[in-house]
Image (cartoon, grey):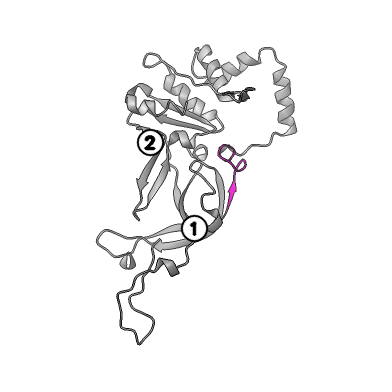
Amino acid sequence: MSVNVPVKCSNPKCAHRDLEIKPETSKFIDFQILRLQELPEELPPGQLPHYIDITIKQDLVDNSRPGDRIILTGIVRIEQESIVGVSRQSSGLYRLRIDGNNIEFLGGRGIKSSRRTEREEVSPEEEKLIKALAKDPSIDQRLIDSFAPHIHGHSLIKEAILYLIVGSTQRILADGGKIRGDINIFLVGDPGTAKSEMLKFCARIAPRGLYTSGRGSTAAGLTAAVVKDKSGIFMLEAGAVVLGDQGLVCIDEFDKMTPEDRSALHEVM
């Protein structure tokens, strides 16, 4: 997105070619560029999400934040993309972008509610089955046995991971303090004890789960980073913990991270 300054004055009697913008007589509008990305939990394992740049104006600016889940309505445009050594007008490379007209938030609007997954409807038959299972005195053991059944043993760890997935409600105390309902789990063990496999299974069955490796990961890659796109505009790129907000993030090889990068996760946890 750029401003095209005219080469010469539109008045045929004017020979001046040194033209410049006068801000005091110009009309300005709010403008923002977003990057829309596929939902991580809808992708096949190992596949990177596709993205497309969105241009929004006026009252839509600053409505959404990085990590929000939205449904966007807009008009698809095609524009030439500049290549090194070739002017934009002579470039043979084109890319798609969208002019956004409306933003609808999945799960409601707000810092937290807009990052929740779209709630699935429970059918009457499923509700009846859930209530019947809840009356089973051995339901807790059945759930533990159903978690990663291909991994033998580790019942205590599986039970803890189930508590992590289900979570609890946040408690607000009389003095305004808060007690969070979520827990964090740190698995420590020898190589080949199925730690990574349990993390992958956990991320696969969670409604909103992300699996990443700490080997080679940085604080910016896990939280958020300021990146510069091809047009020279700085943008905020969300990391794994931002995309997994209100969900589950499984970080493997946690010990391979540097102490500085690990410290960035303290506030997240």
Q: Position of residue 150 (x, y in %)?
A: 50, 19
* Rendered position, 71 above or below 145: below
* Rendered position, 29 above or below 42: below
Q: Position of residue 50 (x, y in %)?
A: 44, 46
Local crowd size for mark 2, using a 10 Å CA cut-off: few (<14), some (14–19), many (≥20): some
Query: Dividing the picture into quarters, in which one does residue 15 lie?
Result: bottom left
| Extent of the magenta region | 103-114
Amino acid type shown at disc 1:
Asp
Reply yes or no: does residue 105 show up in magenta.
yes
**What SS does tag 1 mark?**
loop
Amino acid type shown at disc 2:
Gly
Instruction: Decide which of 159, 54 is in the foreground and name it.
Output: 54
Q: Position of residue 200 (x, y in %)?
A: 46, 27
Q: Residue at x 34, y 54 (%)?
A: 232
**Mark 1 → mark 2, Cα distance in angstroms:** 29 Å
Q: Which mark is residue 3?
A: none
Task: Name the residue that disc number 2 marks.
Answer: 221
- Contact between labelled residues 2 and 1, with CB atoms less than 8 Å apart: no
